[in-house]
């Protein structure tokens, strides 16, 4: 008995040593390409290091962060006509006019520039930031993430429900669903860029005109109000199939007997959807949602290819700071901020998913 | 309305929905094919035509000039070669390193297993863009040029995913296989190499395909690392920065031809292995 226990613990020890040895290469790689660079980025974010320059960097404390995140809200005083003493009214729109933001935003010690204006309780305010491009990039990335993930979920669920019902040729659709997923993101951005051309050379403008929308000369990628919707449209096309595939796998886990029982009880299709499909699909959908959200928060390819420097996502702003401005310290601080954003979501994800350990 | 009439209407509506879905999924790709077969004049016709038509006679007249130009473009051919090297090497490396780790995580008993799994899982969600400046520093620090640099850095996203997919596969293989081998005097590593690894071939194909596609698709690192080394550009970078023949005009006919050329092999691959790919894509999300 004694002997046997010894032998098995020896065996266990050997097994344990083998396991560590087998895990070693993976962890070495992950340290070299992920953890060490992450540490480096964290340290660099407190310096003014310049990219590809021999100059010794200086320690600048939280300077990069305050520069990126510095924001202020100021009230805009009404623009008063000196003769009448009344607020000047825009002759075109009839709306009241206000002082220019430049006059109320602080300039010392840092210059704040306008991000946006808004009205609240009859007063006009301006949101100023020391780096308005970054604040806009954060805001645009969040809008992009929420809207595109929402649309992808709704459309993906619709497609998944259709493909889940038995009919001839559903294998063909399922195969077609993989096409947008398989297209390189840059390639799909280029394809859509061409479809979205600003004249009737572009097919979207032609289709819009057929439907009575626009004059056939909508500049989808340069008019600010069309930029985000266009980018979202491309992302929705590219990733809805992925969402649909995930949801389809979830749908297939729901046993048919449940639906049969519901039908026997006289429940219609809508009723079945609300009381069987939705609750049972919830775990799959939650996972798919968070998965897509993490992905959307770091969007780069579509923004960089289609909008270049006219509008940024967090990631494309990071890229331009690093390569265009060579501001390595600042780019590192942006990286840390993105990391924090995504970390919060990732923690939620792991909580929801749970890890099977054995 | 009679019952059979309602049934017919339902069927028609259903097929219209199916048709719309197909149109939505495939139209952009059709448009790329259509545009790639047009010459410069045909591309500039307003309104644009749904098949390549002659500007004057309006007859169907496709051209293969764009494909010819693409295959004569050094940048594009080099891009294909670079992409094949980078994606291929990344895939092989992550399968080799990853199957070791997955065997340990799926079949061996050791202390710290659950934290190791946690680390791998959290790495699958690692935001690559965060470490862009740091990774660049590491690669120049190691004295690597762009291509080995890309291969090494793509492991950030292919390796954790590969380990994750393979671990769930190893876990499902019966433990008796390993015990039988050990009774016959094989060490655990021999059991892994001679008995378990051949059995995981399907999982290796799945994980390998997904790793290959992810690496083939990557743009951010490729764009950054090849900024000073244009000869090492991969396909996505080459297509994003396609050289303009006429200075102020983007050569969309050629870009679309290039898009079609790089998309077709991947689509064929994906269609052949569609079951595997769907299983691999959904494995992490559903089983977890």
Image: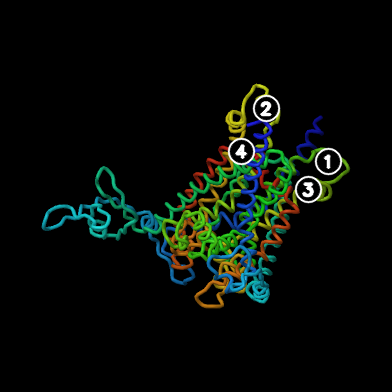
Badge 4 crowding class, 10 Å Cα cut-off, few under 14, some 14 to 19, many 20 or more, is many
> Quick one: label 1, few (<14), some, or many (20+) residues within 10 Å?
few
Residue B112 in view in this figure: no
Instruction: Give the foreground label among 4 and 3.
Output: 4
Can you identify the residue that label 1 sits on? B177
Q: Which residue is mark 2?
A: A258
Query: Percent position (x, y) of residue B154?
Result: 62, 59
Q: Indicate the secondary structure of the residue bearing disc 4.
A: helix
Q: CA distance from mark 1 to mark 4?
A: 33 Å
Q: Position of residue A354 (x, y in %)?
A: 60, 37
Q: Chain of mark 2?
A: A
In whole angstroms, how far apart are the C-alphas of marks 2 and 3? 35 Å
Question: Which residue lies under the disc numbered 4?
Answer: A284
Separation of marks 1 and 3 at Cα, in angstroms: 13 Å
Q: As drawn, which residue projects farthest toward the top?
A: A265
Q: Are marks 2 and 4 in contact (CB under 8 Å)?
A: no
Q: Please tell me which residue lies in front, A168 or A249.
A: A168
The alpha-carbon separation of the residues under discs 4 and 3 comes to: 26 Å
């Amino acid at each position: 008995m004694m002997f046997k226990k010894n032998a098995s613990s020896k065996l266990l020890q050997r097994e344990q040593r083998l396991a560590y040895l087998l895990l070693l290469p993976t962890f070495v790689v992950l340290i070299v390409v992920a953890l060490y660079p992450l540490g480096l980025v964290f340290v660099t974010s407190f310096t003014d290091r310049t990219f590809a320059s021999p100059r010794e960097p200086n320690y600048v404390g939280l300077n990069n962060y305050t520069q990126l995140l510095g924001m202020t809200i100021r009230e805009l005083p009404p623009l008063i006509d000196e003769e009448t003493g009344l607020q000047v009214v825009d002759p075109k729109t009839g709306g009241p006019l206000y002082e220019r933001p430049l006059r109320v935003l602080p300039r010392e010690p840092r210059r704040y520039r306008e991000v946006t204006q808004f009205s609240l309780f009859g007063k006009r305010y301006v949101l100023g930031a020391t780096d308005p491009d970054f604040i806009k990039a954060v805001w645009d990335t969040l809008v992009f993430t929420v809207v595109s993930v929402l649309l992808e979920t709704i459309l993906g669920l619709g497609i998944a429900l259709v493909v889940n019902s038995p009919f001839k040729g559903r294998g063909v659709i399922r195969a077609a669903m993989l096409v947008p997923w398989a297209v390189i993101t840059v390639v799909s951005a280029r394809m859509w860029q061409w479809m979205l051309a600003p004249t009737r050379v572009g097919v979207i403008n032609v289709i819009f005109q057929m439907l009575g929308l626009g004059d056939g000369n909508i500049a989808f990628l340069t008019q600010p109000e069309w930029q985000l919707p266009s980018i979202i449209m491309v992302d929705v096309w590219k990733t809805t199939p992925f969402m649909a595939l995930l949801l389809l796998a979830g749908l297939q886990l729901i046993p048919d007997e449940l639906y049969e029982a519901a039908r026997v009880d006289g429940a219609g299709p809508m009723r079945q959807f609300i009381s069987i499909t939705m609750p049972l699909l919830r775990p799959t959908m939650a996972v798919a949602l968070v998965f897509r959200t993490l992905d959307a928060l770091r969007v780069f390819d579509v923004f960089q290819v289609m909008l270049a420097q006219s509008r940024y996502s967090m990631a494309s702003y990071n890229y331009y700071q690093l390569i265009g401005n060579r501001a390595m310290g600042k780019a590192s601080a942006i990286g840390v901020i993105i990391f924090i954003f995504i970390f919060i979501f990732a923690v939620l994800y792991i909580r929801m998913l749970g890890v099977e350990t054995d | 309305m009679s019952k059979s009439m309602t049934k017919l209407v339902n069927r028609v509506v259903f097929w219209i929905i199916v048709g719309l879905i197909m149109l939505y999924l495939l139209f952009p790709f059709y448009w790329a094919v259509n545009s790639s077969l047009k010459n410069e004049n045909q591309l500039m016709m307003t309104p644009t035509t749904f098949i390549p038509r002659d500007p004057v006679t309006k007859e169907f007249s496709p051209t293969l000039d764009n494909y010819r130009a693409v295959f004569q473009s050094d940048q594009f051919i080099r891009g294909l070669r670079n992409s094949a090297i980078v994606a291929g090497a990344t895939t092989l490396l992550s399968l080799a390193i990853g199957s070791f780790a997955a065997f340990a995580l799926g079949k061996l008993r050791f202390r710290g297993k659950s934290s190791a799994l946690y680390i791998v899982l959290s790495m699958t969600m690692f935001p690559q863009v965060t470490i862009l400046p740091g990774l660049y520093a590491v690669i120049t620090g190691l004295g690597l040029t762009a291509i080995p640099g890309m291969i090494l850095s793509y492991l950030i996203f292919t390796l954790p995913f590969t380990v994750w997919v393979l671990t769930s596969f190893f876990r499902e293989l019966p433990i008796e296989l390993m015990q039988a081998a050990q009774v016959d005097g094989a060490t655990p590593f021999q059991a892994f190499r001679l008995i378990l690894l051949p059995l995981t071939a399907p999982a290796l194909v799945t994980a390998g395909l997904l790793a290959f596609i992810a690496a083939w698709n990557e743009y951010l690192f490729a764009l950054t690392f090849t900024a000073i080394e244009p000869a090492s550009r991969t396909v996505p970078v080459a297509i994003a920065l396609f050289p303009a023949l006429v200075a102020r005009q983007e050569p969309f006919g050629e870009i679309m031809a290039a898009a079609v050329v790089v998309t077709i092999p991947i689509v064929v691959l994906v269609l052949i292995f569609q079951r595997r790919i769907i299983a691999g894509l959904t494995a992490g999300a559903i089983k977890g």
